Amino acid sequence: MAELTVCPVEELPPGAMKLVHAGEIAVGIYNIDGEYFALEDRCSHDDGPLVEGDWEPDRAVVICPRHGATFDIRSGRALTLPAYLPVETFPVRVVDGLVKVDVT
């Protein structure tokens, strides 16, 4: 597992999202009410980028900009068609004031 430093916690306040790259994988890091979550930036329906779409912090969902599929940010579970498979999630933690994500 590769650990990637995302940013200092001040740079990712509640309601914010940041895209990071770990080799060939792009990962969206989301702050929902002070909790951090990470999703692969790839819709399971057609491999489109998720972070280019809207997201709703109050519902913890991200909406694919291509076809409107929604995903639960906390679990990666597909919530609406046309997607039915989940997207990959990654563990996020804060160490010494830095947001870090473990990407496999």
Image (cartoon, rainbow, N blue to C red):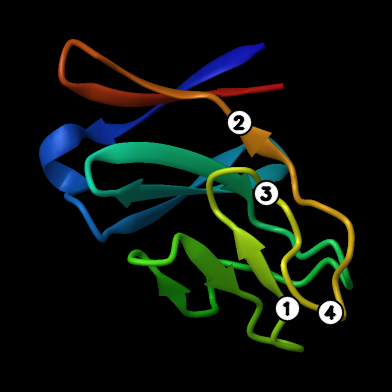
Q: Secondary structure at mark 2?
A: strand
Mark 1 secondary-structure assignment:
loop
Q: Is residue 73 left or right of residue 45?
A: left
User: Where does the image place residue 30, in percent across and percent down from the top left?
Assistant: 40, 50
Alpha-carbon neighbours of circle 4 within 10 Å: few (<14), some, or many (≥20)? few
Q: Which residue is mark 1?
A: 69
Q: Answer with mark 4 or mark 3, whichever residue precedes in sequence.
A: 3
Nearer the observer: mark 2 or 4; the answer is 4
Residue 64 % position (x, y): 66, 77
Mark-to-mark CA distance, 4 and 3: 14 Å
Marks 3,2: beta carbons within 8 A: no
Tell me the number on the disc at residue 90: 2
The quarter in which the N terminus is drawn is top right
Q: Upstream in the sequence, badge 3 or badge 2? A: 3
Residue 46, by quadrant, is bottom right
Residue sitting farthest toward the bottom: 67
Q: Secondary structure at mark 4?
A: loop
**Relative side of 95 to 101, left or right:** left
In whole angstroms, how far apart are the C-alphas of marks 3 and 2?
Answer: 10 Å
Disc with the residue nearer the chain's start (1 vs 2): 1
Q: Residue type at mark 3?
A: Gly
Instruction: State the residue at coordinates (33%, 66%).
Output: 58
- Viewer-proximal residue, 49 or 69? 69
Of callouts 2 and 4, the N-terminal one = 4
Q: Is residue 34 left or right of residue 88?
A: left
Give the residue number, with chain letter if any, for mark 4: 81
Residue 10 occupies which quadrant of the picture? Answer: top left
Q: Residue at x 54, y 79 (%)?
A: 53
Nearest the camera: 31 or 100? 31
